[in-house]
């Protein structure tokens, strides 16, 4: 008989085998590096002492798992207690996995309610249809889609075009202008399209995110395009070691925005090229 139960500490050996099995069907549609990085990320999240883990067992066998964790910074910015489902996996075919994941999602939602959580999100790979269908069936709404592009850097990143502006690293005097751009630079992201949040809340969240990026908490570099003292656009970049065996450095372009009056002038393209040039010395993969 299958049992759904909270589990602490987590049996990482059994869970690792389950994750490899459940993610194996998705490996064909993802690169080897991406697949292994996602697996390692899930295992790290399960080790986090803040994680709440529920499993489905048949005796000693782990058949399914869900893990969620509170999001203190998001909660502060949104004004409501927020959390995220970090891991949702199950063995079995599509039908069996969806049924098992639905039960796990219900258990996680109940546990979140018991802890005062009012805003729960999940980020699911597009190919994981059983998770998407399970979450949708339990009342979750689809808010956003994320497309990841990557490039290998080999020391030959194109230099940013100079069309009446310069591309350079962020300076402290730029901060107020970056916050102004961030507060009005986004409209179609998951925060702005979510009916549970007001546009003002979403705008303030991005401004706070950029402020943390400029202070080094959320980014390792912030690149700006500027005409004289006027900032026209920015991009935030984060270094990461989430590659198999950490053979090479990697990084991620996180946020990009352009001032309204500077749109259509190639500023965003130039600042993205500037980011590639800045990171080219690392000779890694940036996306």
Image (tube, rainbow, N blue to C red):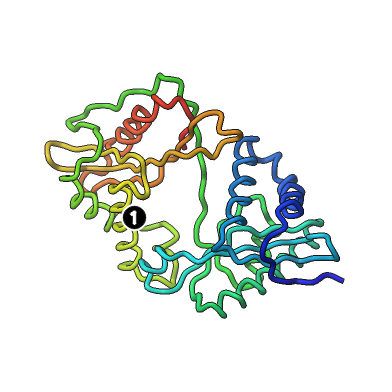
Residue at image point 21% right, 29% down: 163
Q: Is residue 13 above or below residue 285?
A: below
Position of the N terminus, as image quadrant, is bottom right
Is disc 1 placed on a helix, strand or loop?
helix
Residue at image point 23% right, 49% down: 178
Q: Position of residue 20 (x, y in %)?
A: 73, 47
Q: Is residue 14 above or below residue 140?
A: above
Residue under label 1: 209
Residue at image point 68% right, 56% down: 129
Q: Position of residue 140 (x, y in %)?
A: 58, 69
Q: Quadrant of residue 245?
A: top right
Residue at image point 31% right, 39% down: 268
178 on left or right of 18: left
Q: Quadrant of residue 29?
A: top right
Q: Position of residue 234 (x, y in %)?
A: 28, 43
252 on left or right of 125: left
Decide: few, some or many residues near mark 1? Use Cα within 10 Å; few <14, some 14-19, many ≥20: many
């Amino acid at each position: 008989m299958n049992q759904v139960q909270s589990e602490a500490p987590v049996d990482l050996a059994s869970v690792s085998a389950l994750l490899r099995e459940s993610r194996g069907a998705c490996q064909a549609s993802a690169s080897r590096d991406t697949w292994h990085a996602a697996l390692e990320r899930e295992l790290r999240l399960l080790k986090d002492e803040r994680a709440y883990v529920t499993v489905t067992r048949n005796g000693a066998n782990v058949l399914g798992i869900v893990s969620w964790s509170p999001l203190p910074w998001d909660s502060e910015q949104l004004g409501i207690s927020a959390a995220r489902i970090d891991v949702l996996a199950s063995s079995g075919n599509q039908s069996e996995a969806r049924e098992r994941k639905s039960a796990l999602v219900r258990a996680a939602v109940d546990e979140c309610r018991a802890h005062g959580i009012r805003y729960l999100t999940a980020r699911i790979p597009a190919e994981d249809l059983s998770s998407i269908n399970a979450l949708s069936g339990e009342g979750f709404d689809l808010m956003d889609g994320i497309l990841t592009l990557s490039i290998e850097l080999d020391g030959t990143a194109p230099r940013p075009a100079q069309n009446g502006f310069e591309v350079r690293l962020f300076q402290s005097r730029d901060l107020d202008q970056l916050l102004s751009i961030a507060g009005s630079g986004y409209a179609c992201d998951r925060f702005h399209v979510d009916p549970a949040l007001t546009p003002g809340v979403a705008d303030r969240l991005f401004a706070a995110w950029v402020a943390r990026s400029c202070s080094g908490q959320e980014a390792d570099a912030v690149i700006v395009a500027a005409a004289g003292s006027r900032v026209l656009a920015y991009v935030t970049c984060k270094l990461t070691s989430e590659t198999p065996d950490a053979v090479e450095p990697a990084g991620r372009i996180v946020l990009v925005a352009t001032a309204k009056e500077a749109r259509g002038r190639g500023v965003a393209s130039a600042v993205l090229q500037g980011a590639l040039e800045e990171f080219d010395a690392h000779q890694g993969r940036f996306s």
